[in-house]
Amino acid sequence: MTTHPSPSDAGPNWSKVELGPELPLAVFASTERWHSERIGALALYCSDGRWGEACDEFCHKHLLIPRYDRWAVPGGPAWLASRDDEQGFCQAAREQLDFLVKFHELEQVVLITHYACAYYGHRLQKSPQECLPVQTADVHTAANTLRSWYPSMRVETYLAMRSGNCLSFHGLNQQVNPVPRPGKDGTASTTTSPGKGKSRRQV
């Protein structure tokens, strides 16, 4: 018995694709379909592409915000925690966010800073572990800045960590140890709590 794919499973119906007089034929057709509804959420994180897939997975599977707005810039939330000599960053961020809040109807912003961020390593000239306290402070400053600009905005803050090739995300609303003991490969390691014999991950 021959089966035919349902309309939802079929590929693009090219007979209905209108090509303008100067538009060339498509070189690729996405399997994703257009969804017109907005999610009302934005994630701000570093532009380091090695973390991009993990950030997508975290936002999709844990935070449950599919098709969220993405804002990827070097240092991520650092743009909202600029020093006095970097106020241009903050002003540029405010202008873009004002637009997105109004026209993309944002109600939630997720701030993610990641371990061993090159932006902080260059700026501070310190090791990844030594940069973490500044990154954590910047994320909290960025969150407070957003809440002052948009009082009804829901803001969440996270630290993305790496241990070997394993990536994890940790909420920054709770107190964490900002300086982990470096492992052999320079990534975060685990220590044993005195008298308990249980491994405790430091972030």
Image (tube, rainbow, N blue to C red):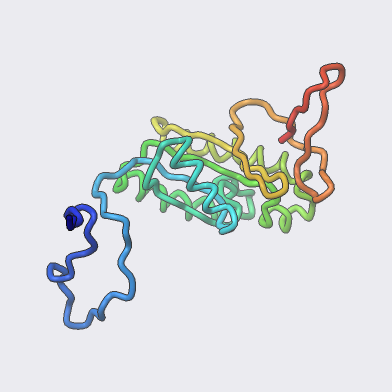
Residue 182 left/right relative to 56: right
Assign the N terminus to one quadrant of the image: bottom left
Residue drawn at 33 percent across, 75 percent down: 27
Q: Residue reaching furthest top?
A: 195
Relative depth, front residue between 151 and 191: 191
Residue 195, percent from left and from top: 86, 17
Q: Is residue 88 visible?
A: no
Relative depth, front residue between 21 and 144: 21
Image quadrant in which you'd find residue 24:
bottom left
Residue 105 left/right relative to 76: left
Residue 3 left/right relative to 50: left
Q: Is residue 13 visible?
A: yes
Residue 77, percent from left and from top: 56, 46
Image quadrant in which you'd find residue 188:
top right
Assign the C terminus to one quadrant of the image: top right
Residue drawn at 51 percent across, 41 percent down: 58
